[in-house]
Image (spheres, rainbow, N blue to C red):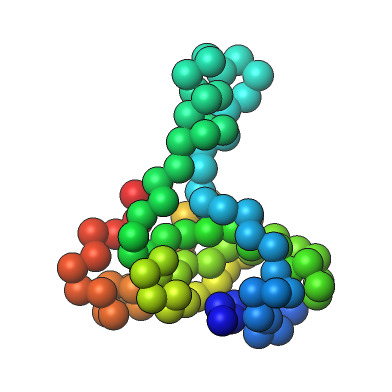
Amino acid sequence: MLILECPYCGVKAEETELSPGYEAHLKRYGPGASDDEFESYMFARKNPKGVHFERWRHVYGCGKWFLAARCTATLEVFGTYPAQTSAPPPDLIEAIKAKRPGWEGYK
């Protein structure tokens, strides 16, 4: 079972207490966006095998959204961080690189 720590309330919650919000750090386009930009935002997802950055909501806890880095192949969780963060924290990137030496990094 996937266990994530909420960075707001500090609770280590099982995935049954959480709700997935799918891929994190997506570029959202405003009202003046082209049809192609809007379609890309709505439907195009990376869905990689390996390290992935995701949005989660602590539904049966504090109710807040947060972001997590985990491996989609092994379910290993590298860490969580606040949803207002525009890119993964440097210490989290270093932790991932330490465990996955060949990892190309956050893009």
Which image quarter is the N terminus in? bottom right
Q: Is residue 6 above or below residue 82?
A: below
Residue 62 falls in which quadrant of the image?
bottom right
Above or below — where is 74 with respect to 46?
below
Q: Residue at x 62, y 24 (%)?
A: 30
Residue at 46% in and 36% down: 44
Pinpoint residue 81: horizontal percent, then vertical percent: 57, 68
Question: In this orientation, does residue 33 appear?
Answer: yes
Q: How many marks?
A: 0
Q: Is residue 14 left or right of residue 52?
A: right
Image coords of residue 54 (percent x, y): 53, 59
Can residue 6 be seen from the camera position used here?
A: no
In the rendered structure, the answer to whether residue 18 lies left or right of residue 55 reads right
Residue at 37% over, 64% down: 51
**Residue 27: image location, x then y, percent:** 51, 37
Compared with residue 43, is residue 49 higher up or lower down, i.e. above or below? below
Q: Which residue is located at x 28 percent, y 80 percent?
A: 99
Judged left or right of residue 8, residue 67 is left
* Drawn side of residue 15 relative to residue 96, left or right: right
From the viewer's side, name the closer residue of 49 and 100: 49
Asked where in the image residue 70 lies, by quadrant, the reply is bottom left
